[in-house]
């Protein structure tokens, strides 16, 4: 009789966990379920730190915040059906902003696929357009290769999310396949090396330009090009504006900084673009929120565009000098070809425009707390700590004020859903960022609308002792839509008033009772275990920030702010960049 | 808007066709015909997609296709010297006209009668996009009962 031989090889689930470890993962944001139990069984006792979000969407945003704050690949594991469909918004958010994520989804067993089984959804079909790539694994032998490919694809070229869908029976099956070391994907060769002739054309255009502007986006941060861009700008006197995603790529304290460009950009940035004779887009993609009316965008300028994504070049504006390649490699090639050019007239003009500041607001007569002043107070209080600071935002007015009134000086320190504009991003992205940057002061700026979209993730901050400072600018409004209704829709506040009073007839509450605003955010935060305080004046805000920033616990600071402040300046949708609304009527 | 013939070499794997079609329709572009078959390498499929669109639209379609992970190569065949062919099967009722005039039109285009029924003919025609369109214009006055089109396939000659 032959002695018992233990089975050789590893299960598919074990291959997944080994693959994550081999690819440098340290933290997994995971929510289990029937089709993911085998994966979680192998997480049990593994060296991976597991963070349980309270909703899969929150988990993906945490992985996203972690990735943006650290530059590493964020990783999440979810179950089949609703577990996977709940990731869609998070994947779309990461896709739009070029954030590397690997999401492992459980799937019903191979034999059940297509039978409308319990918790079955066509995950690869549903997520196809919101991922850079996705896989449905059909054999356990594929898993080691697929996991490594997923990390390779997520983190190279223009980064993005990759979803790997693994049926339960394949997680349980045994394979002898070893882990994959050198990975290459047959048909995937992102363009990295820029064509030298195009770089030479760009250098020539820069050397001949009298009024050049660098317009830099998130690609500058992703590619690690910030220092090079800074040295080019400063050595050759080229002013710099950034997109929302590019905030922090160039220090806004520099006299060459024009701050942010676009719909809520500064007068300096928008004027400079419109008056420039050369616009050099670096890792930016001419989004409609940046360009305003395309026909009027930078009319007098040649457009040069450096991007790793060939499909981004020429998509929205006509490009005179396209350079497809990695931004850092392009700049390294470009730098030695640049010459000093006298641009003193242009710089004098820039200095004049800069007097207008990135944005301004007028003190109110009624003494209500102004959200812009809160952001300025956050900026001062954060700077006073002397610590590296990471600011995450939700979406809407809070996001724009955080962009305008905080002085962004470091890359990977401003984390915001730019392309997708996902409400509910502010809270979980801060949790993820703090996990990745335990050294940093992480501040999460939210409105009272988006704060409730993933409010459940506050518990994760408390559980894991993550000292995130959550700020809610409570104007009892869905403020950005309310602003558009005031400016363009005749003050018809449809479904944008969150307090019980002041709503239109068809939203009226039968008998408004005290309190007139629900929920009590301070009460909710305390119930989740946070320290929480409500501030109604600037002095109270400053005091609360000081206390919170000095403390090692998670805090909520709810600021009761004026309900009718607008984000200004503003370029109306469909208007030219030069046509800015500067003052409230 | 000019029709463009785009050849795409893709990995021969499940899900790739859905990905390519989803990409094109998801961005609001319209596919006129689509043909997929194996290439001379069994692990690689060749897709031929006919899309109407301006130069800018087609350039964007090509760039978007090219960045897909499973795509080896994308060619806008229309912009190069090429040969394109489409096969069509056409069933025409001969009840009103008799067979002779239908056969006469078919002969003019080198088409073949491949099926004969008491009151209908089935015709096979192979030609370039332009020839197929001309042929369909000429048979239009007849009582056409059914059409099956293969979609274009094309090959660059350079």
Image: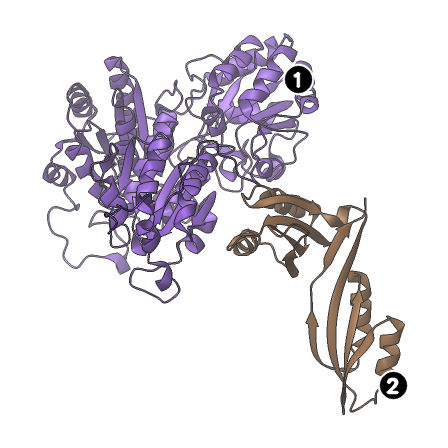
Q: Quick one: B148 or A206, which is closer to the camera? A: B148
Which residue is under mark 2?
B100
Residue A203 is marked as 1
What x and y, as percent, mark residue A577? 54, 33
- Mark 2 → mark 1, Cα distance in angstroms: 70 Å
Asked if one can make out residue A254 in the rendered structure from this viewpoint, the answer is yes
Asked if one can make out residue A363 in the rendered structure from this viewpoint, the answer is no
Report whether A124 appears left or right of A297.
left
Report how many numbered discs are placed on residues in the image: 2
Report whether A333 appears left or right of A166.
right
User: Chain A drawn in what color?
Assistant: purple
Q: Which chain is tinted brown?
A: B
As drawn, A176 above or below A201: below
Q: Chain of mark 2?
A: B
What x and y, as percent, mark residue B149? 70, 69
Q: Chain of mark 1?
A: A
Quick one: SS at disc 2?
helix
Image quadrant containing the N terminus of chain B: bottom right
Image quadrant containing the C terminus of chain B: top right
Quick one: SS at disc 1?
helix
User: Local crowd at mark 2 within 10 Å, few (<14), some, or many (≥20)?
Assistant: few
Report whether B150 appears left or right of A116.
right
User: Local crowd at mark 1 within 10 Å, few (<14), some, or many (≥20)?
Assistant: many
Residue farthest front in this picture: A1
Q: Which quadrant of the view contains residue A364?
A: top left
């Amino acid at each position: 009789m032959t002695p018992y031989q233990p089975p050789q090889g590893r299960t598919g689930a074990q291959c997944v966990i080994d693959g994550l470890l081999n690819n440098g993962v340290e933290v997994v944001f995971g929510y289990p379920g029937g089709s993911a139990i085998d994966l979680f069984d192998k997480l049990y006792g593994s060296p991976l730190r597991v963070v349980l979000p309270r909703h899969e969407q929150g988990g993906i945003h945490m992985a996203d915040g972690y990735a943006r704050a650290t530059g590493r690949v964020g990783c999440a594991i979810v179950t089949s059906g609703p577990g996977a469909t709940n990731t869609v918004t998070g994947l779309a958010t990461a896709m739009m902003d070029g954030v590397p994520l690997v999401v492992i989804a459980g799937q019903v067993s191979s034999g059940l696929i297509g039978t409308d089984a319990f918790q079955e959804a066509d995950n690869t079909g549903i997520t196809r357009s919101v991922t850079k790539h996705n896989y449905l694994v059909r054999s356990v032998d594929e898993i080691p290769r697929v996991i490594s490919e997923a990390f390779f694809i997520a983190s190279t070229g223009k980064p993005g999310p990759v979803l790997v869908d693994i049926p339960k029976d394949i997680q349980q099956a045994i394979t002898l396949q070893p882990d994959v070391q050198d990975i290459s994907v047959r048909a995937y060769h992102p363009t990295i090396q820029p064509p030298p002739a195009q770089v030479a054309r760009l250098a020539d255009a820069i050397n001949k330009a009298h009024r050049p502007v660098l317009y830099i986006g998130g690609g500058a941060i992703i590619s690690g090009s910030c220092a090079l861009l800074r040295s080019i700008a400063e050595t050759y006197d080229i002013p710099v504006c950034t997109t929302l995603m590019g905030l922090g790529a160039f220090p806004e304290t520099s006299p060459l900084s024009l701050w942010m460009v676009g719909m809520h950009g500064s007068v300096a940035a928008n004027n400079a673009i419109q008056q420039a004779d050369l616009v050099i887009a670096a890792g930016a993609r001419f989004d409609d929120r940046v360009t305003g009316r395309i026909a009027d965008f930078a009319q007098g300028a040649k457009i040069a565009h450096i991007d790793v994504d060939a499909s981004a070049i020429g998509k929205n504006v006509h490009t005179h000098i396209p350079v497809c390649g990695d931004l850092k490699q392009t700049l390294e090639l470009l730098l030695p070809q640049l010459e000093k050019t006298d641009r003193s007239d242009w710089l004098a003009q820039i200095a004049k425009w800069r007097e207008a500041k990135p944005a301004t607001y007028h003190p109110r007569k009624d003494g209500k707390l102004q959200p812009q002043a809160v952001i300025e107070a956050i900026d001062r209080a954060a700077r006073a700590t002397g610590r590296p600071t990471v600011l995450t935002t939700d979406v809407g007015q809070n996001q724009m004020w955080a962009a305008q009134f905080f002085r962004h000086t470091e890359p990977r320190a401003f984390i915001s859903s730019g392309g997708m504009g996902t409400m509910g991003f502010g809270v979980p992205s801060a949790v993820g960022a703090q996990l990745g940057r335990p050294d940093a002061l992480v501040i999460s700026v939210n409105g009272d609308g988006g704060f409730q979209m993933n409010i459940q993730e506050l518990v994760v901050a408390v559980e894991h002792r993550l000292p995130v400072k959550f700020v809610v600018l409570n104007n009892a409004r869905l403020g950005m839509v309310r602003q558009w209704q005031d400016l363009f829709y005749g003050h018809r506040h449809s479904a944008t008033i969150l307090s019980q009073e002041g709503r239109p007839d068809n939203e009226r509450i039968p008998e408004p009772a005290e309190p007139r605003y629900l929920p009590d955010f301070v009460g909710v935060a305390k119930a989740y275990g946070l320290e929480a305080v409500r501030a109604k004046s600037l002095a109270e805000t400053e005091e609360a920030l000081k206390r919170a920033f000095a403390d090692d616990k998670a805090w909520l600071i709810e600021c009761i702010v004026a309900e009718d402040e607008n984000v200004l300046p503003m370029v109306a949708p469909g208007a030219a960049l030069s046509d800015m609304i500067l003052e409230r009527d | 808007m000019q029709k463009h013939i785009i050849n795409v070499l893709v990995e021969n794997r499940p899900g790739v066709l859905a990905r390519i079609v989803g990409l094109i329709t998801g961005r609001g572009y319209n596919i006129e015909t689509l043909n997929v078959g194996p290439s001379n390498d069994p692990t690689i499929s060749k897709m031929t997609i006919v899309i109407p669109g301006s130069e800018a639209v087609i350039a964007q379609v090509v760039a978007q296709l090219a960045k897909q992970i499973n795509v080896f190569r994308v060619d806008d065949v229309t912009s190069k010297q090429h040969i394109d062919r489409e096969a069509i099967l056409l069933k025409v009722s001969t009840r009103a006209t008799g067979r002779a005039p239908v056969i006469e039109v078919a002969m003019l285009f080198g088409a073949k009668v491949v099926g004969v029924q008491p009151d209908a003919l089935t015709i096979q025609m192979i030609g370039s996009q332009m020839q197929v369109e001309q042929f369909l214009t000429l048979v239009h006055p007849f009582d056409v009962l059914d059409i099956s089109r293969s979609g274009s396939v094309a090959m660059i000659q350079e």
